[in-house]
Structures are given as C-alpha cells and as structure tokens.
Image: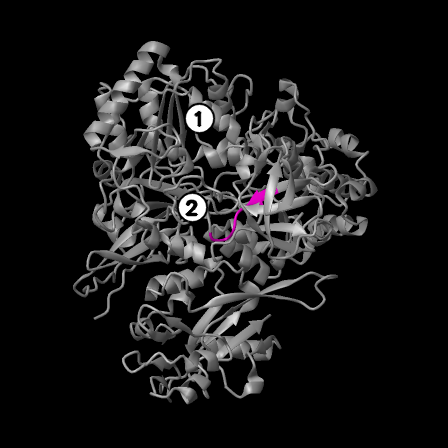
C-alpha cells in the first residue's frame, strides 16, 4: 500500500500586495485531491522545523507511535521539500535522553548542578510566590525576559501581564539589529528575517561575510545555489575562505574590521566613473551630492591599503556590480554584531545597493508578498506595558526597537543594578553563549534573586537557574499558526507528532499556568482553540492544515518596480535616503564614514566566530547525529604562517587565552586561507553544563573571549573586537 | 529493458552541508558514529593562486563489476537485476573482506548487527516510488537519481544534457575496471 500526503498548494486566489487586512478569497479545495489509505501503524503530522529559526515546513512520519523520519513539505516556500542536517536530526533531539524531563528546582549553589525534580504544580507555585514577592518589594519592572523561538510570545505576553517592559528578544541586539536599523534608515523598512534578496535571478551577488552555505537557511541556500547555477557572478568578501567562498567566482580576503572602507571606496569609484543607475538615483534617492562630497577621500588606493585587497579587485567588483545592475545585490548581512560600527556599515551596503537601483527588481531586492490576515490574540485582554525600559531602547538609543529590546544592554543593566532588576526569565535562549561577555552574565546572575529558564535542554544558562521548566519539543506540541512572507505569503501549521515523551508542557501552557498562579486574571487561549478561531476566520479547518501543513494564501508580484510601479519608501523624504535625515536629526553621522576598529597587537589574534552548516546557535551541539559529522571535534582556524611562528601544526590541540582565561582545547586547522590577523571558531561549543553530556567541556566558548562593545546607533552588540592568544594545549 | 539505477552529483551545487548524511542516518538507523554517504573536500591543484575547494559526495558506487561481490565468501553481497549492489544481512558472516576490498571506502562494519553495511540506493523507498532519502533532502539539489536505461528519466536527461554541453563528467577510479554507477557532473 502506498501512502503519500499531498501538500499541493490549493489556494489560487491572489491578494494584491499591500491590500488591507482581508480574508482569503474563494477558498476551495482543488479538485482531484485523493485520500490515500494509510498502512496501519503509519501516520503523518505537520510541523515547521525548530532546529533553527528559518521555520522550514516538514512532515513527520510516525511509525507505531514513534517519529521515524522528518521530510520537508514539497510546496512550503521556506524550503520546497528540503531539510538540512539540523532539520533531519530533529528525530535524535526528540529521543535524546539528555533532554530535560521534569521541572527542576535548584538545591545547591547556582552552577553546582544540584537540582531536585518537582511536580509542575510545585514549580509553578514556587515561581509565583517568589515573583509576587519580588514585585511587591521592587515593583513590576524588576522582571526581565530573554526569549527566542516559536514559543517566545508566550513568555513575552506573560511578562507584560506581570507589568514589566524589560523584554528582550536577542535576535535584535545580538544578531540583526544593526542591519535592520541601517537598512530601515535608508529604505524605510527593515530587511526582515527572510532576507528578500533575489539570488535566483541575480547576475551579480556580493556577500560581505554573509556565509549563506553555512548559515544554512534552506530557502536562502536554494535561491543562492540556483543563482550560481544560473550564472551569477559571486563576489565573496571574508577574512576566511568559507564554504560560501567555495561557490564564489571571486574570493577577496579582507583584513578583518575594514569592510566599510571597501564599500566606501566602491561607492566613490562608482560615483566618480558615473556608472551608477542614474535613472533610479536621480529620481528615487536623496542626498547624492552630499554623498559624492563625503566619499571623495575614500579612494580605491586608500581602501586597498586598509583592506589589503588589490586595487584592481576593488575596481573589478564595482564594475561587475554596475554592469549587472539592476539585477544584482550586495547582501545586507544577517548577524551584524561585529565591530560596534555595524549600523554605519549596513548604511554603506544600503547606499551601494541604491546606486544599483535594484529596488524591487529581479536579481535585486524583492518585495515580500504579504498575507495580511486578522489573527486572534492568545491573551485577549493583554495590555502591553509601555514604561521606559532599563536597557535604554527608545531612550538612550532612540531608534532601537522597544519591542525587541537590547539584550546586551539589559544584561549589563542587571549586572550593574542601577535599577533593581531581580527576576530574570529566560525562554529558549542562552545568554551565556549569546552575550558578548560571560563576566557580565555571571554578575547579572549573582545580582538576580530569581532566575527561571524554560528550555528543552540543560543549557549553560539553565544550569545557573533557580527553576528549570522543561518544554515539550516542537514535535510534541501545538503552536499558534504562523504567517510567513517570501515571494508568496503562506501559513504554517504545527501539531504534535507524538505525545510528550516526558513530563513537559508547551510554552503557552506554562505561561498560562504561571499567570494564573500569580493571581492574574488574563485569559490565555488554548493553542488549538486559537488555531480553530484563526482558521474559522479564513474559512479553513484543522483538517485542511493536517493535510497540507503549509498553505499559500497570497501570490503577487515581488518586483512591482520592474513592472512599472513607482518605488515607495517610508522615509522622511519619501525617497531612499543616501543622506539619512533621521540620523542627522538625531545627531548621528548622516553618511557612513570609515572608523577603524581596534586592531590586534603583537601575537594577538582577532577572535571571529560563526556557524557550521550543521549547528544552530548553542542549541544543537549536543545532538549525537550532528556531532558525528565532525567527530565531536571543534576546529580552530589559524593562518599557516602565524601557526608556524607559534610552532602549531595542523591537528594540534590548542587553547584560546585571554588574560587569566583559557579555553578547552580545540583542533588547530592550519590553513593559508584565513587572514593572519584572525582565528575562527564555530559558535556554541565549550558548554559548562554537565547535563549536555556529549559536549560539556568540548571546544571553546567564544563568549568567554569576545568583545561586548555597543553600536551607538542601534544599541546592538559588537563581538569581534575580542583579542586573544593561541597556545598549544 | 531492465532497469539500471544510477546516481549523479552535480558537484557545482554541493555546499558540504551534510544533510544527505543525516537524512540517510535517520532513514536507516545507521549507528550514531557511522554514515553511508560522505562528502569529501578537494582542492584544485592551483589553489594557492586561485583558491578553490570542491565538495564531492560519495557513497556505494553500485559497481557493475563490484569487488565486494567478488570477494564475498557467502554471496551475501550480490548484484541485483536493477543494478543495485545489495547485502543479504542474514547470510553475512561479518568477515569484512568486502569492506577492505571496496576501493571507494563505501562500507563499514555495523557493530550492533555484526554485518557489513552500506548504501542501498534506498531500495524500499524507490519501491514505494520515492527518491532515495539523500536525494529528497538535498537542499542544493545536487543529487539526481534514476534509471539510466530509461531515456525519459531525470538522470538520463542530465547525462544527455551534459554530453551535449560538454560538461565535465567522470566516475571514480575507472582505471580499476569496477564500472561504477555514480556520475560526477561539473558544469
């Protein structure tokens, strides 16, 4: 017998881009949909992947009550049927005995790893009493939250109910904050989590450390590989020859920290040679003359000396882009927390893109097709707290997002205790790894009177918490339906493939129980009830979602400008702002300049870190299937000449040293193709939690050695000004 | 005509993400430390001037004249009609001759079961009309699988296209006379 789940796109109606909130038109199942009989013992469940945050649609195959395999949903526009190594390893995570299995309350010193197993009732009551006492003593603003993941809104809503504005989603300050601010200052809207670069149709692509092959978001990678196959000329700029470099036509090894100099010289060259997209620049941008004047000193010769990239290569890159314009793009990046000058770096990227006139053009920047639907609220009577935040978002950093907050500044504020921030909640993230300074995290932990972490594993942060709440994994829970936009707008559905293996709950149920125990009367919807209400409002049923998993609800033109529409920019001038009037008004430099970051001295290296294709953040390192891909070894990339001087040979065990601190050993990967100033390690290793049994003490924890500088515009962190030495273990 | 299953890798599209390795592991409960497919990294000889790394998947080549079949003392390893080299685990005695005889290092010893193990081209999946797990999951669409005796198959079309356009097409160690059935295509 044959069983297949058809996930055919069945909504053919098109919502006009930019249309007001509407329900899906003319919903009807496509004729010919056939129900296949299912062999006994085999069922299928729909989900989106939570092994990273790209949210690939997937179907879980369940055999005799056990998840046997995960496969991508063919028509889900996030991944078109594919899953990466991380996605495939979700099965191992589900059945990993290292998972948190019961609520835990700390019994020993923080960090001792001594906990007792308790019931949910006991854990909830304990937290509620402690939290209410803190609130009575210090006021509601005493609570802080660090949250990331599909369930993050459960704890976001809870903290609003508890009365605190101090909510941080680290994906802003620790990742894309500077990028989205720099882009929004230029174009009037942020880049967004599904970067709208049209790699498939691009004739030329320039990436400045955007390591698409190893950051590995499936849809983004597919587009990029298709673009390469379609003949895009790829210029890859990085101090290190990554796997993305291997797909490039031109690899430019840049001296780390000098990328803005490269961009400014390219802008200058393009303006002097008058090879920019004149029609676009003259009609749809503002500040050309100021820009021209401003970049005059930034010559190619000057940039070549700073970046160590030959002049001819800089010129060639500029000319290749211009020849391809408007069907080209310079990638705005993703995690741009490098040198504390990242917003201005992105401004330079945005300006260079504007000179290409690639806005809403094939091969350039596309317009995501929105699916605008009225969604119900999980908490009906939620009043969002609008008080001033302790991290300075909205005040010290007036254009930093107050919704997402500044996780870096919040952690510093907790450590410094200028405000009595005593109750720390953590959901699905791991400040010991995502903050630039583990000392700051340690101080913040010492200063806190209550630390609650909701997680699926005993992360380093959970290890130091007072209460650890085990969450059900994505394969064991419902979550509210999500709406996603790429070149179409679509909804994605999550249902449990199996019942929770252990004594765990989903984030929403945990938040609801906490809220109730604390005495708040807000009503949390049940997730299924929410999904039903949402689906009812658009004429769909749970059965539709169980069948398809992902449904496309809006199709439209992602290139309206190419189709003749006038470009629209929600900036003060209504144009793409080469000269940023908002920055000028706020007292920031309205045009980007090159500001040299501090440089390593003597035998120091600049510590760079990033992703491997098969790990996410500090979340997946303990997964045995993924660890086997690299034999549990953590490589430290080091330049061959520098290594030789230090007597380090390929494969040697080496440690990172900074002052008194020394990392666990890593394996030296001695290569010519990393800049001599830098070493590189993969992120997420070196955990101290002994309940991550396969990776405790394995490799270096980058956050012990990185910098924690602050970008003055976005307020985001800068990690790459950390200078270290390397010694043999 | 008899089927002749084969696989091609469009190597330009591979980014060494290793999704294939984990999908295969999940599909076949491959022991944690082992894999039935791998990705090797190769350097162009002139890499110091014009640096280029290549990512080259590999797995069982399902050879027409397979050394593993030749050396197997119990005939546990055998060549099927459809071209797939298979292992009958019931009569495998775990002597490991096949493992050392394979010039492609495609086999390993499954310590849990005490038998040799390798890629099966996902036989049960193809019987169901599905592509092999590595093909289905590959984010780069590197892998193309099918019947090279069927001119309408995707792999036949790819190989025809490659011949017409003079893409570089090769197989591993053809000098050994093993007649492998994995094609490497570089556009």
Residue A338 painted magenta: no
The answer to which of A501 and A31 lies nearer the viewer is A501
Residue A612 painted magenta: yes
* Quarter where residue A39 is shown: bottom left
Q: Chain of mark 1?
A: A
First in residue order: circle 2 vs circle 1: 2
Find the residue positioned furthest to the top. Answer: A137
* Quarter where residue B71 is shown: bottom left
Q: Is residue A333 above or below residue A588?
A: below
What are the residue bounds of the magenta stretch? A608-614
Which quadrant of the rendered structure holds the N terminus of chain B? bottom left
Q: Residue at image x 35%, y 78%?
A: B94
Q: Which residue is mark 1?
A: A403
Q: How many marks?
A: 2
A98 displayed left or right of B5: left
Q: Residue at image x 22%, y 24%?
A: A125
Q: Is residue A325 above or below residue A156?
A: below
Q: Which residue is mark 2?
A: A52
Q: Is residue A331 above or below residue A507?
A: below
Instruction: List x then y, in percent, for residue A679.
Output: 64, 46
Residue A602 can be seen in this image: yes
Q: Residues within 10 Å of mark 2 (few under 14, many from 20)?
A: some
Find the residue positioned furthest to the front. Answer: A729
Instruction: List x then y, in percent, for residue A229.
Output: 57, 62
The dot on residue A91 is: none
Q: How is the image coloured?
A: one colour
A275 displayed left or right of A665: right
């Amino acid at each position: 017998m044959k069983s297949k789940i058809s996930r055919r796109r069945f909504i053919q109606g098109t919502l006009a881009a930019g249309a007001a909130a509407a329900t899906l038109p003319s919903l009807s199942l496509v004729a010919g949909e056939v129900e296949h009989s299912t062999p006994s013992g085999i069922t299928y469940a729909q989900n989106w992947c939570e092994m990273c945050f790209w949210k690939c649609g997937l179907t879980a195959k369940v055999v005799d009550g056990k998840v046997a395999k995960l496969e991508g949903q063919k028509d889900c526009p996030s991944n078109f049927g594919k899953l990466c190594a991380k996605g495939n390893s979700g099965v191992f995570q589900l059945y990993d005995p290292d998972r948190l299995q019961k609520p835990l309350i700390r019994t020993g010193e923080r960090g001792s790893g001594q906990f007792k197993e308790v019931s949910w009732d006991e854990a909830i009551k304990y937290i509620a009493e402690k939290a209410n006492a803190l609130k009575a003593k210090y006021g509601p603003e005493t609570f802080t939250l660090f949250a990331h993941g599909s369930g993050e809104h459960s704890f976001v809503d809870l903290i609003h109910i508890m009365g605190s504005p101090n909510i941080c989603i680290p994906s802003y300050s620790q990742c894309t904050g500077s990028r989205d601010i720099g882009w929004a200052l230029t174009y009037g809207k942020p880049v967004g989590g599904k970067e709208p670069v049209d790699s498939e149709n691009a004739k030329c692509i320039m990436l400045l450390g955007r390591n698409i092959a190893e950051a590995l978001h499936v849809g983004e990678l597919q587009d990029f590989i298709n673009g390469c196959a379609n003949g895009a000329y790829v210029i890859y700029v990085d101090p290190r020859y990554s796997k993305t470099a291997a797909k490039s036509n031109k690899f430019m090894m840049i001296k780390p920290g000098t990328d803005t100099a490269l961009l400014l010289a390219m802008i200058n060259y393009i303006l002097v040679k008058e090879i920019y997209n004149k029609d676009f620049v003259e009609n749809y941008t503002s500040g050309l003359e100021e820009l021209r004047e401003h970049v005059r000193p930034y010559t190619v010769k000057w940039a070549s000396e700073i970046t160590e990239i030959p002049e001819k290569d800089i010129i060639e890159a500029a000319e290749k882009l211009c020849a391809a314009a408007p069907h080209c793009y310079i990638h705005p990046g993703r995690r741009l927390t490098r040198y504390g000058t990242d917003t201005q770096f992105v401004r330079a990227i945005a300006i260079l893109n504007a000179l290409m006139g690639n806005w809403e053009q094939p091969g350039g920047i596309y317009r995501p097709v929105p699916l605008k639907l009225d969604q119900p609220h999980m908490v009906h009577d939620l009043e969002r707290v609008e008080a001033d935040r302790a991290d300075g978002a909205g005040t010290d950093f007036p254009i930093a997002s107050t919704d997402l907050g500044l996780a870096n500044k919040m952690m510093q504020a907790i450590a410094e205790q200028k405000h009595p921030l005593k109750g720390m909640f953590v959901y699905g993230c791991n400040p010991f790894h995502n903050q630039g300074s583990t000392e700051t995290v340690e101080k913040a932990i010492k200063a806190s009177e209550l630390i609650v972490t909701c997680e699926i594993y005993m992360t380093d942060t959970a290890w130091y918490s007072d209460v650890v709440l085990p969450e059900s994994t994505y394969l064991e829970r419902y979550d509210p339906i999500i709406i996603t936009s790429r070149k179409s707008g679509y909804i994605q559905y999550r249902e449990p493939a199996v019942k929770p293996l252990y004594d765990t709950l989903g984030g929403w149920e945990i938040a609801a129980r906490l809220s109730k125990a604390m005495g708040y009367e807000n009503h949390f919807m049940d997730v299924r009830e929410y999904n039903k209400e949402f689906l009812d409002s658009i004429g769909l049923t749970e059965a539709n979602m169980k069948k398809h998993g992902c449904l496309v609800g809006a199709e439209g033109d992602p290139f309206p400008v190419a189709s003749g529409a006038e470009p629209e920019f929600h900036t003060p001038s209504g144009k793409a702002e080469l000269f940023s009037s908002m920055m000028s008004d706020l007292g920031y430099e309205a045009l980007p300049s090159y500001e040299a970051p501090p440089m390593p001295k003597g035998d120091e290296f600049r510590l760079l870190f990033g992703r491997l294709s098969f790990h996410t953040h500090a979340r997946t390192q303990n997964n045995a299937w993924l660890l086997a891909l690299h034999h549990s070894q953590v490589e430290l990339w080091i330049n061959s000449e520098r290594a030789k001087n230090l007597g380090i040979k390929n494969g040697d065990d080496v440690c990172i040293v900074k002052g008194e601190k020394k990392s666990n050993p890593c394996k030296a990967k001695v290569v010519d193709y990393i800049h001599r100033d830098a070493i590189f390690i993969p992120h997420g290793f070196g955990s101290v939690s002994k309940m991550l049994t396969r990776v405790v003490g394995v490799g270096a924890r980058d956050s012990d050695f990185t910098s924690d500088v602050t970008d003055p515009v976005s307020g985001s962190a800068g990690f790459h000004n950390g200078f270290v030495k390397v010694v043999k273990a | 005509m008899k089927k002749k299953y084969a696989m091609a890798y469009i190597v330009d599209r591979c980014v060494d993400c290793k999704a294939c390795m984990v999908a295969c592991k999940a599909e076949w409960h491959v022991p944690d430390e082992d894999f039935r497919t791998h990705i090797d990294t190769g350097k162009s000889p002139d890499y110091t001037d014009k640096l280029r790394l290549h990512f080259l998947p590999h797995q069982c080549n399902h050879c027409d004249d397979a050394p593993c079949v030749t050396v197997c003392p119990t005939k546990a390893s055998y060549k099927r009609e459809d071209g797939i080299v298979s292992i009958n685990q019931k009569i495998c005695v775990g002597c490991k001759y096949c493992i050392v005889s394979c010039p492609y290092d495609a086999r390993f010893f499954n310590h849990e079961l005490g038998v040799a193990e390798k890629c099966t081209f996902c036989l049960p999946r193809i019987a169901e009309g599905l592509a092999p797990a590595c093909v289905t999951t590959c984010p780069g669409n590197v892998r193309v699988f099918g019947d090279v005796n069927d001119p309408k198959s995707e792999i036949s079309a790819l190989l025809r296209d490659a011949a017409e356009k003079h893409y570089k097409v090769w197989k591993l160690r053809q000098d050994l006379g093993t007649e492998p059935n994995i094609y490497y295509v570089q556009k």
